[in-house]
Amino acid sequence: MTNSIVHRMFCQILVLITVLAVGTVDAAELIQIIHGPEAGSIEKLAASELADIVNRVFDDVEVRSGGGAPERQPEAGTIIFVGNPDTNLGIARNKFDWPKVSDQGIAIVSNGKQKLHAVGGGSPAATLWAVYELGHRLGIRYLLRGDIDPLSKRAFDLSGIETTIEPQVRQRGWETLGAGAHSFESWGLADHQRVIRQLAKMKFNHLILKIEPWHPFLNFEFEGVMKTTGTFWHGRTYPLTGDVVGRKAFGGANVFSHPSSADAPSLVNQKAAQQRFLTSLIDSAKSLGMTVSVQTRRSRFAPEFAKVLKGSSSKPGQLLSVSPANLKKPEREAQLLFAAEMNSCFKTYPGVDQVSWLKARSTTRRFGVVAAVKREAAENTIPNLERDRTVGEKQTEIPAPAEDSRLSLAIHSPTLDMLPQTHSQEVQRTLQDAVKAGWTSVSIGPSTVNEFSQDVHHVSRAMWDVSLSPAESHKDLWATTTGNASASDRLWIGRQQLEKASTLILENDPDLVELGPGMLMERHYIAEPIPEWWQEATDAYTQYMIELYRAQGAVDGGAKPVLFYYAKRSEFVLEYLGAVKAVREAALAKKAGDNEMAIEHLELALESTYNCINTLADVARNQGDRGLIAVLNADAYRPLVAELERLSEEE
């Protein structure tokens, strides 16, 4: 027998074995996802997202997605209709027991015997939320930084997915931009858009863009004076040359800058680029069914307007502060200036639905009351800022809601922005009190992502069910994503320690680590011993870090890198708190006339500061992390180096 004949026989046998083997393997489950033939962009997106979810969760599935009628085959598989009876005839014709829902209500219904399901809501946006709710019920968890998928895929099964829910808070807002190089103010378009997509998955439906007087997003004229101020971070610059620590986080850049300015060398081009940036943010939110408002300062303006508001309080390079007590011109002038700014928002950004402003804040700073003017009422409205002031700057209890008002719920303390922090128990109580008082519009606005993803996850679901406790939400997140109940329990112990540390600092010294010039040397280079509560807070942070490392080492999957990031940030904070303690001890030694010991403590402080910045640089994930590194270099590390050099020269 020749070699060629043997080869042909071998190939034929191999083909036969392959055919027989394939015949013994179960065919993939066919899943047809059908949106209405006239579906709009959001419902089409919902169908596409559902197809992606099914592929991510289940093994051995063949997913087909499209509009119109499903394919008719001997084995039609499972059919999932997306929409509602008005937008998808498949839901109407198959006689689902479709519940009566509001425009924000979501429904997931099934006819298990026929392998038919329907996912949708009372509006296109609600249909999208219903898809993401199904994803949650199938084991996906949505965080600000991204999704965490189930640890492993499983056999296809949609039993027990049925639900009908309505939100207890109808307008669920997200506040962004804000102030500070460490905050969302530093983020570029792509990063913001990723967060907005995650917010849609968590069923937020209102985007609030907090514009500061120094921002470049508005150009308008008032009484012959044009707004010319246009910058970020109140005009501060952060060079990344010389002895900068954590350089690896910046990719070789020589200065920390806003991404929207990268391709716009001139000031005019920069303003145009930054207005396009804001327009794109608005368009992104609109494409996901969100409404948009701009929140401005009601009594702070760019310094150039001092020319037309005589008597207002301002210093060179600082914002113009307006109050009835220091204005020589009538309060009406400030109101007209604010109205000009408000109308500039509407004119510049057609996608903006409201302009809002903070009119009162609670004494505990746990919430603020925000007033707003809708677009259709803007031309005939001059906000009565004096009336707002009579409401009082400080609220002790949650008031009854007024028309077009919003409750801003503080899930973080701005003065503790650089620290890992949580105030989940207080946030839960405040949200429950708000719903009880009748508030249907509530927003949250942490400065950046950091550890706030877990709090945002909790609030996003509690806005639909205010009885959901932080502990229940924690278990829902971590027991699911880690697949390890013990790890989830350890993380809850750590979370309680984090809340203990946050509360201790906030109650005893809320300005302990406030970012800005003088944050280390001016604030802490004082001959005063560390207070007694300090050690208790440090111990709580230490225990938080230990639990994070314990849990992170025991899990796999998408939760692992998240927990590692949290663990490194807790390590970073302990290094910084060590630097603060060493600076205090250096000041005490200096007062006692022991410069040698003072230098020794300053060297320890410098080492701790260096370590804390490098630790953060190891896991820097976003522009907020990089901005914090830039701030710590400018306001903590370099002033410490300067004092150490000065004191060493005296020796």
Image (tube, helix red, strand yellow):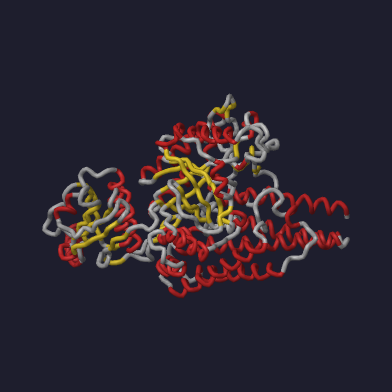
Relative to 85, is 162 above or below? below
**For the view shown, which residue lies furthest in the bottom direction?**
486
> How many numbered discs?
0
Which corner quadrant holds the C terminus? bottom right
- Residue 9: name its quadrant: bottom left
Q: Nearer the viewer, residue 195 or 297?
A: 297
Instruction: Say if 58 sits above or below 369 in the image.
Output: below
Q: Quadrant of the N terminus?
A: bottom left
Residue drawn at 24 percent across, 44 percent down: 39
Residue located 66% across and 31% down the image: 310
Between 397 and 146, which is closer to the camera in this rendering? 397
Q: Quadrant of residue 585?
A: bottom right
Outermost residue on the left side: it is 74
**Residue at horizontal 40%, vertical 56%?**
169
Whole-percent x and y of residue 118?
Answer: 23, 57
Residue 52 visible in this rendered orientation of the protein:
no
Q: Position of residue 90 (x, y in %)?
A: 17, 52
Answer with left or right where residue 150 lies relative to residue 586. Answer: left
In the rendered image, the vertical position of residue 208 relative to residue 527, given as above or below: above
The x and y percentages for residue 246 are: 63, 52
Q: Is residue 513 above or below residue 375?
A: below
Could one spot residue 632 in this view of the protein? Answer: yes
Rendering coords of residue 362 (x, y %): 56, 55
Horizontal placement of 540 versus 115: left or right?
right
